[in-house]
Image: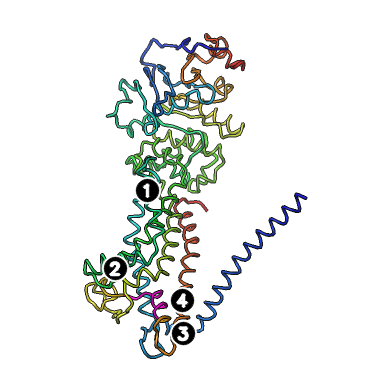
Amino acid sequence: MNKLFNQIAINIIRLIAFLVVILLALLIGKILGDGLPHVSFKFLLTPAKAFEAGGGISIQLFNSFYLLVLTLLISFPISLGAGIYLAKYAPKNKLTEIIRLTIEILSSLPSVVVGLFVFLVFVVEMKLGFSIIAGAVALTFFNLPLLTRNIEEAIASVPDLQLEAGLALGLSKWRTITKIILPESLPGIITGIVLSAGRVFGEAAALIYTAGQSAPAVDFSNWNIFDEASPLNVLRPAETLAVHIWKINSEGIMADANQISAGSSAVLIIVILIFNLGAHYLGNLIHAKLTSSR
Amino acid sequence: MQYNLEEKYIKKFDNPDTTAISTEHLDVFYGSKQAFFDGSLEFQKNKITALIGASGSGKSTYLRSLNRMNDSVATVKGKIMYRGIDINRPDINVYEMRKQIGMVFQRPNPFSKSIRENITFGLKENGIKDKSKLDEIVETSLKQAAIWDEVKDRLDSSALALSGGQQQRLCIARAIAMKPDVLLLDEPASALDPISTLKLEETLLDLKKDFSMIIVTHNMQQASRISDYTGFFHMGNVIEYDATKDIFTRPKIQLTEDYISGNFG
């Protein structure tokens, strides 16, 4: 009787797990099936057109990556510091609890609210205007809690014995953390970064009022960061791929709006898939390299 | 049966020159709770001293206080004398001190680096950069720890691929590569199988000519096999400290005798 019950339970759990996989496969299959026929090098490499058919997503794609890089440049050092502190230095007291609670709350703020906040403070009050940097700040707010949590967990997963081993050799706690603990937690940290990159890459709501909804033409041969036409200029408005999808679907008037939307969605999904799969692979590779294990 | 914890026998030594490290009235507190009471022991140079006692008797707490590994979790009062200096003073450079007083832990904890890097890491951090010098120390310390023959062909592969017993001997090699005076061992064999344990004990006996060792152990046979002196701990007190053969054949305190003969409590 017990055995039968066990069998039934296992099969139900299997069915549920299977359903989740099917659901994901259907979703990705549908998006890729609709979108991939419209994706071509020309699509990826030409700028968007506002009224006629035949536009591409080159600037939006670049903006998405550039915004991602800027966001990580701002949020990674902060998250790393916070993660080290929380994992290895923070005493178990009220203050630490408050810090953790704050991070928790920050991570559950709706992204559209974060976007509005950054809009009011940075775009309007500080007169930054719709700009990549305002978008990067919004995404940092949004990215910090997740990344900090990931880094803290990666560091905390290294046994305390390693810290003791370093201390017993006469190293300071800081030296042991930077030389022993961090290299060992690097796979986890990298996985955390890449996963959060995927999340940031697909974010739209927080960017509508910060990085803006327009993608002015940029000159990819101009690398002067202060020039307005330069793709590297951080003060120019920059519509990202995710925002582009939203924009086309809500007010696109070009003849091939549906195809562009489907193609953009497919590209977005593919990039995020690459991030997710790459995170795992890269983490393992680096771990093997650093620890000389095979 | 109620024992009188005031009834103690602590061996004293006449010649201060033979003492490697000693404590005077050492008390250890975790928060407001006192975990160890009034320990005054002298540990002899080039000898193995075993600390025995039941779980929670304070022997590990005492051992970890000697190189101030407990600083962050406990308050340690009293003196720890090493070469005429009280190393329990707040102004002591604990990092320098720990190079003189090395430690091996209960569970093998090699760094997840190669075997070679496990040895050279601490040395490089202390400014030894010369390649041939490093190679030489790697070889001598691995030989001293009796693991050279097993690993000499794979020095650059991961230390984590070694067996538990090999990892523990690597940890000993790592500790002695720093050329400490005193080696503290906190139940180093408790995670090892009997054969690895015997091998480890042989290694420790070999190391006696170069280092003074203090070893915490649960295993009384181990204490009697390898140690010259033994301290018996009970409920945070050192009840008896004497030559190992005396402790195991004719203990002076009833409590020690009951513990050793298994008539405990």
Q: Dot 2: few (<14), some (14–19), or many (≥20) neighbours within 10 Å?
A: many
State left or right for residue A71 relative to residue B105: left
Disc 4 chain ID: A
Magenta: predominant secondary structure element? helix
Q: Which residue is mark 3?
A: A258
Work out whether mark 2 precedes mark 1 in sequence or the reverse, and give the earlier one: 1
Q: Which residues are magenta?
A: A238-247
Which is more N-terminal, label 1 or label 4?
1
The crowd level at tag 3 (other Cα within 10 Å; few <14, some 14-19, many 20+) is some
Q: Earlier in the sequence, mark 1 or mark 3?
A: 1
| Mark 1 or mark 3, whichever is nearer to me | 3
Q: Position of residue A186 (x, y in %)?
A: 43, 53
**N-terminal-most mark, 2 or 4:** 2
Callout 1: residue from which chain? Answer: A
Do circles 2 and 1 both sit on a common chain?
yes
What residue is shown with label 4? A267
Q: Which amino acid is tagged 3? A: Asn
Q: Position of residue A98 (x, y in %)?
A: 36, 47
Secondary structure of the residue carrying numbered label 4: helix
Distance from Cα at disc 2 to Cα at disc 4? 28 Å
